[in-house]
Amino acid sequence: MFAYKHGTTCKPEVLVRVGVLGVGRIGVHHAETLARHPDVADLVLADDDAERAREVAQRIGCRVVAGVDAAFAVGLDAVVVATPTATHPQMIIKAAGFGVPVFCEKPVADGIPATLEVLAQVEKTGTPVHIGFQRRFDAGYLAAGAALRAGELGELRRVHLVTADREPPPAQYVANSGGIFRDMHVHDFDILRAVTGREVVEVYATGANRGADYFGEAQDIDVSAAVLTLDDGTVATLQGSRYNGAGYDVRMELGGTKATWAVGLDDGVPLRSAEPAVDFPAGPSWDGFLRRFAPAYRAELGAFLDLARGRITSPCDVRDALRALYIAEAADLSRRLHRPVRIDEVQQ
């Protein structure tokens, strides 16, 4: 059981009062999920765009309050942070000050120093924090990780990761995203750690700007590749693209001495076989992350509600997010310097 500074407690059998801060695309998606969840007794929305918040609240049947401070004044048992990235540290630290368990979309902060500051604050207060890396709750990744741990793959020898968007994000987003390795591939880096149970020790990354000029103007790339060495010597490879016109493609392949498993090789994978007698996959292709990972997002929020009620520890805390960020920072530095970068070069 967690005791909060506002004087309430949240026992495992009690329904939860949840605040959602930010009603952009992902915030609305989370609010819709929570509004339908049987463990949520009260759902409160807050956003700087009060009119949008009212429209969403009316549509899904919940309350809206005038800003973040008003949301915490309600006496929340849990809070979901889906505000712009620059505000994440402030929101997490505010929640920690109230002792309210917090779910926050990645990233924790814009960079390593700010992430370390958030880590220090949440560890000081002991507030449970869950960072939103939804692939950890995807059935395929979970099955592959379980098979690896059970010995079904034998000794792991190689891993391959793919993340490719159907179409690129807008210029304004790219300019403030932190780059493809921090924004997009950080999910690959996190799930690589989660599935294999190993740490990355070195990265060699490269890439190119083959699309819109605004990627180059932001010192970013739209085609990416990397080789990652794990602490046991296993080699992982990574490919990415912002222009995968066939559809949204997210996969992971694990090759062991006994078997090879593939995650994401379903009827929605945007691949076509060149073999004449093969008609897999049936299609249609995935169009984006919300459809591809819809069950994972629901499971992720269910786990967060369990965290808020003290049933589990955090499935992905600030320290996990920091480790993924270290890999992303090393990858970006490697691309810029045209050389391998060890993770300890970027650690602080």
Image (cartoon, helix red, strand yellow):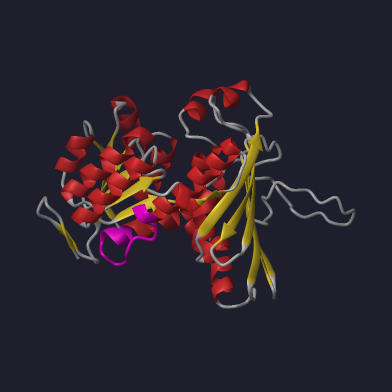
Question: Is residue 148 in view from this perspective?
Answer: yes
Tell me the quarter of the picture where residue 234 sits: bottom right
Looking at the rendering, the stretch of residues picked out in magenta corresponds to: 305-319
Q: Is residue 42 left or right of residue 213?
A: left
Q: Locate residue 276 relative to residue 282 in the image: left or right.
A: right
Q: Is residue 248 visible?
A: no
Q: Quadrant of the N terminus?
A: bottom left
User: Is 269 placed above or below 113 here?
Assistant: below
Q: From what the image shows, is residue 320 above or below residue 79?
A: below
> Relative to 76, is 211 on the left or the right?
right
Marks counted in the figure total 0
Quadrant in which residue 156 is drawn: bottom right
Near-viewer residue (70 or 3) = 3
**Residue 275 position (above or below residue 339):** below
Task: Decide which of 310, 49 is in the foreground and name it.
Answer: 310
Q: Residue furthest left?
A: 7
269 and 343: which one is in front? 343
Image coordinates of residue 176 in percent, x first then y, are 45, 29
Picture coordinates of residue 126, whole percent (x, y): 22, 57
Residue 245's place in the image compared with 311, above or below, is above
**Is 117 within the magenta?**
no
For the point 35% across and 52% down, the residue is: 318
Q: Residue at x 38, y 36 (%)?
A: 85
Residue 336, image x, y percentages: 57, 36
Front-lying residue, 346 or 213:
346
Q: Toward which corner of the image does residue 217 lie, by quadrant?
A: top right
